[in-house]
Amino acid sequence: MNAAAMSPSREFDLSRAEALRALNHWLHRECAPGGPAVRVLNPDGAHSIAVGADVPVDIDVLGHAGYYVAGMNKQARVTVHGNAGTGAAENMMSGFVRIKGFASNSAGASAHGGVLVIEGDASLRCGISLKGGDIVVGGSAGSFTAFMAQAGRIVICGDAGEALGDSLYEAVIYVRGKVASLGADARFEPMTETDLGAVRELLAVAGFDHDPATFRKVASARGLYHWNADANQEY
Amino acid sequence: MRRQLEPLGIRFETDNDTEAACRFLEWRMREGDAIDQAIEKGFEALDGFFTFLIGTADGLALVRDPFACKPAIVAETEDYVAISSEFRSLAHLPGVSRAKLFEPQPRTIYHWSRA
């Protein structure tokens, strides 16, 4: 039992009218560091739960969340005790977001920082345009994972779908299972000590028990960094 | 596609692209394809984003295009199959808390028939 569960918590029951607006307003305007943990009841797939938080607070969403849960998160630790819709933790700046179930398309899109953990599967385009955040997927990740990802790390404990790491920049992917196909300009690279350390660190943060040595690294071949007039547009 | 199908006797009621996709499947099934075969041919013939939910007299088929841009979620219980673009509209169904929830995979045909 963690300390947050024992101290009094602030509850928002989203089955009541205006409760979602009240929750986000409270997070933006009234919630102070060191305050009570937040419990979100009956989320029932509501969109934009706990978006734009900017304070170190624990937020538990007790059910399934809709689109953009914990979007733009800064500092807050958000746990969804269910599945998440499109764009979970998109554009996160810092903090920690955990999805206990599966996450729909574009989870962690454009995240600049923080850690997103998806205990189940991630759907398509997980980590698209990632800009420095870390994502750990306990299950498998769908097609176009890490599309055009610029910085950050993605750990996939299961399999990856088609076009993994298409048009990657400097983000790095670690995948344990099968890869359906690599995207344009993505390639397998040897795991260095730094890579093993990164996977070990992220697995520990996520609470997953795998041997880092069973992961393979996917990174950019950097063949698309410079315009090549002779390429004949055959990417 | 419309220009290909109309000379074959397929009649359109609207100018809607969605109808064109439906009429394509209608044409394939008229030519003897089973619904799964018709959908497979649709993957080659249809260029665009789509999620199809297809009802027949005794069954239901669901399919998403390979890019799966259109949202879809399925709730399966002993009593029913419910399909929607998001969980929000399934949340108040009876027994949904015990349902098997999943997102249909892209380019995969899901088929349910009456027992």
Image (cartoon, helix red, strand yellow):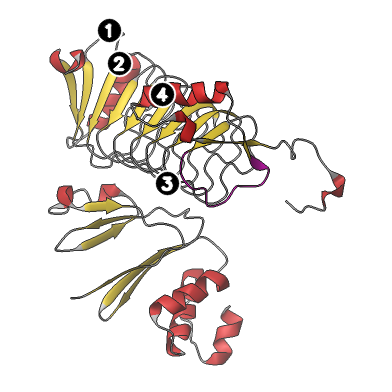
Q: N-terminal of the two: label 2 or label 3?
A: 2
Amino acid at pointer 2 = Val
**Which residue in the structure is indicated by mark 3?**
A123
Q: Is residue B15 visible?
A: no
Give the number of callouts: 4
Amino acid at pointer 3 = Ser
**Which residue in the structure is indicated by mark 4?**
A73
Chain identity of mark 3: A
Q: Is residue A29 visible?
A: yes
Q: N-terminal of the two: label 2 or label 1?
A: 1
* Residue A207: image location, x then y, percent: 33, 26
**Which residue in the structure is indicated by mark 1?**
A34
Amino acid at pointer 1 = Gly
Q: Please state the extent of the stretch shown in magenta in the rendering.
A: A176-187
* Residue A194: image location, x then y, percent: 56, 21
Asked whether B102 falls inside the magenta stretch, the response is no
Callout 4 environment at 10 Å: few (<14), some (14 to 19), or many (20+)?
many
Foreground disc of the pair 3, 4: 3
Element on which disc 4 rests = loop
Determine the CA span between mark 3 and mark 4. 20 Å
